[in-house]
Amino acid sequence: MYFNTRGFPYHRGRRTRANNSFRELVAETQLSVDDLVMPYFIRENNDNPIIKTMNGIKRFSEDELIIELEKISNSGIKAVAIFPKIADEKKSEYAEESYNNNNLACRVLKRINKNFPKLITICDIALDAYTLSGHDGLINSKNEIDNDLTIEVLTKMSLNFARNGCKVIAPSDMMDGRVKIIREKLEDKNHKDVCILSYSSKFCSNFYSPFRDALGSKKNFGNSNKKTYQIDYRNRNEALKESLEDINEGADIVMVKPAGYYLDIIRDLKNHCIIPVAAYQVSGEYSIIKNASDKKIIDYKDTVLESLYCIKRSGADLIFSYFSAEVAEWINK
Ligand code: PBG
């Protein structure tokens, strides 16, 4: 970009910053309720609603979720992401519960479709909520996360959610080739309108820790890590490559995750792809802002808005954020 200026005093940057009207007039980035996706943790009726590491966010029972969704659809939010915390005794080595037609996520999908048929439902496709290990994939006899074996289960899981009315299938597991196979199977079984939002540039991040607490997968996960499948945070080209590959395989939307520390990646993707780019402001990003503002270190509302505007400015078309429901209310006022 070339800026032909004769400098001061022909140019004074402060002229268009002088007051609020000017600042609004020249603002380059807009944030709308239409851009926001709200993630929800759901639980079995007898499970604990409190998530210790995410102050202000809870696990909803099915009934509570329906009441909450009434509220947020009135505020204009059009999409929700659903994360079930299933009962411990339903977790298994081969994650069979993930393709049970009446599992927690499916029961919720059925009720959402009945009560809010227009609401866009996004379901995470990964096995971490269903495995004893807390890993996104299955472990084989060599004690490795088995790519192709995992995809077989992910495909069954995707079809299960599609059958129950899920509108967006969102693979977050980072196995190679899963978008292609899920896409082909969805076509095969006549789920032609189901969207695939691929968590394509997903980094191996420490900022997911509160999420694992919310799902109850943290304890099982122990000291292991997801480095053999999630991207090393030092790698920018690799992140771009993963997203371009997923587009090729049939993804309708790609995603960068986490968001706030990965704005360069969001911009790279935006510059290289012509399909929508999503960004996920993850649980750790949420809790850091929430805790610092609870302690009066920073201002809550201003910091939340800054964090989201900056993600938007970097090129994200849509943003997953645990602040979405609250921000929608602020924007509407
Ligand atoms: C599951 C999944 C994770 C998140 C979304 N889907 C955790 C992980 O990969 O360990 C993280 C979301 C968040 O931290 O808010 N694969």
Image: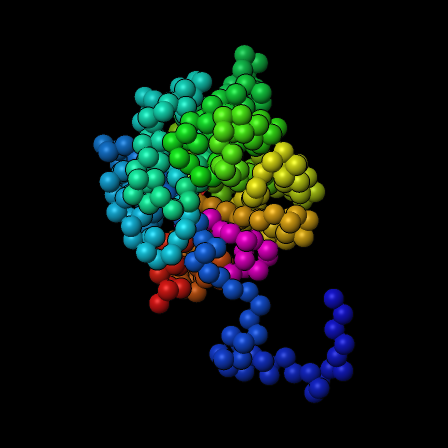
Residue 120, given in percent of the width and then of the height, sits at 42, 45
Q: Residue at x 39, y 39 (%)?
A: 82
- Which residue occupies the foreground of this view, 222 or 269? 269
Q: Which residue is most to the top?
A: 141
Q: Can residue 95 be seen from the camera position used here?
A: yes
Q: Is residue 102 magenta?
A: no
Would you identify the image quadrant in which residue 40 lies?
A: top left
Q: Residue at x 35, y 36 (%)?
A: 109
- Which residue occupies the foreground of this view, 35 or 219? 35
Q: Colour scheme in the image?
A: rainbow
Residue 312, given in percent of the width and then of the height, sits at 54, 58
Q: Which residue is most to the bottom?
A: 9
Vertical order, 136 against 326 (above or below): above
Q: Residue at x 50, y 47 (%)?
A: 280
Residue 45, given in percent of the width and then of the height, sits at 24, 33
Residues in magenta? 309-323
